[in-house]
Amino acid sequence: MSTASHSSHASAFGQLVTGPPGAGKSTYCHGMYQFLTALGRPVSVINLDPAVSNPPYPCAVSITSLITLDDVMEEYGLGPNGAMLYCIEYLEANFDWLVEQLDALLEPQGGSGYIVIDTPGQAELWTNHDSLKRIVNRLLKLDYRLAAVHLTDAHAITDAAKYISAVLLALRAMLQLEMPHINVFSKIDTIGGFGDLPFNLDYYTEVQDLSYLVRQLEEVPRAKRFAKLNAAMAELIEEFSLVGFETLAVEDKASMMHLVRLIDKVTGYVFMPGGTTEENLHALFSSASGTIPGGYADISDVQERWGEGREAFDKAEEERWEREWAMRKQAESMAGGVEGAAGVAGQDDDNLEHMA
Ligand SMILES: Nc1nc2c(ncn2[C@@H]2O[C@H](COP(=O)(O)OP(=O)(O)O)[C@@H](O)[C@H]2O)c(=O)[nH]1
Ligand SMILES: [Mg+2]
């Protein structure tokens, strides 16, 4: 199935996590690691940020073993932006190193596995610089089934100009990376503190008629000068009609489950092509298909959950998830202890406790 000789994996799936600095990418990677481990899906997190030697999550492969931002800045007298681009170009030139690391990672799992890739926040990497895109393309060619998960701080919805520029950036990332793509408003748990917004949350997540925002911007003195530009950008976004947002609060299990479910759908995780029966059984158990407690069918639920209804939701959710974890544990033990599926038993318990 693989197109290159040096890739020995059977089926590899995963996520490429992108977004501006501070959007919550590394926190999300850590949360995803804990969440998937608790669900019984073995997962490895890959750090591609050369500025971070000690990421907050257990890191399986790190670009810093190959090259670090500090070394490049010192050796070539570059600023942090230039040095960052240099590091990613260096990684591209050493793509074989990355593949060897990934192969070594997947080999003990029979050549299949799930990876979550953390990236630096430099917008160039997913707007106009081609190295990251080429690296990902080569992974896709090696049959890594990846989806881009593009995070944007939900705070962007508090300001019309910020919102339009965040949507433009998300659109640019989609067009640049050319892969299955999911946009996410991160830190959605903070919306309760945003005060009264002119529109409901679904207006922002569905990227509905932007002319309302453009009109709003026309009232802002500092934005008046850019009225035509804003209108043109809004029109561009609407013409593409590609952008919509999911929502995420890393600590909220229902919100994580909703995303896992969506990502599994776009990468085809549940099917495990060429997988063994054991692998498929495992994929089925740890996949996000089936009924999910607290799954937000409607975006207005998300707004209520993080607004006035927060306390009541917290309590009900806790009870629902206690039942869900118990059910999953029971299902997995009935599956006859699929080797490796639940990870090390003790570790799994820790994760369940942590997530609970
Ligand atoms: N309230 C809240 N804060 C978050 C969430 N995710 C991340 N953060 C915070 O956002 C900040 C930036 O997160 P980080 O993961 O380092 O962002 P990165 O630069 O995109 O990797 C940190 O202070 C995190 O604690 C979330 O879901 N909710
Ligand atoms: Mg980070």
Image (cartoon, grey):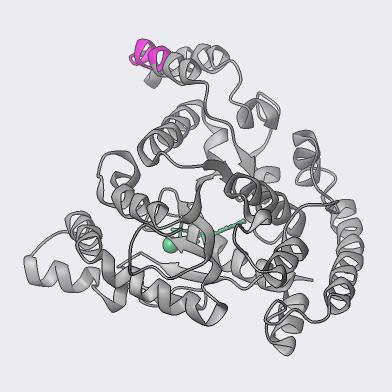
Compare residues 257 and 139 and report the one nearer the observer.
Answer: 139
Residue 39, image x and y in percent?
Answer: 73, 69
Q: Residue at x 28, y 45 (%)?
A: 124
* Residue found at the far left of this picture: 76
Ligand 2 quadrant? Answer: bottom left
Q: Residue 126 in the image: x percent, y percent?
A: 35, 44
Does 231 appear in magenta? yes
Answer left or right for 67 relative to 316: left
Principal SS element in the magenta part?
helix
Q: Residue at x 41, y 72 (%)?
A: 102
The quarter of the displayed image where residue 55 is located: bottom left
Q: Residue 340 vs residue 105: left or right?
A: right
Query: Above or below — where is 175 with respect to 97?
Result: above
Seen in the picture, residue 164 relative to 26 is either above or below; the reply is above
Q: Which residue occupies 20% across, 57% down?
A: 89
Magenta span of residues: 225-232
Marker count (numbered): 0
Q: Is residue 249 visible?
A: no
Left or right placement of residue 249 versus residue 313 in this view: left
Residue 219 at what x, y percent from top left?
A: 49, 13
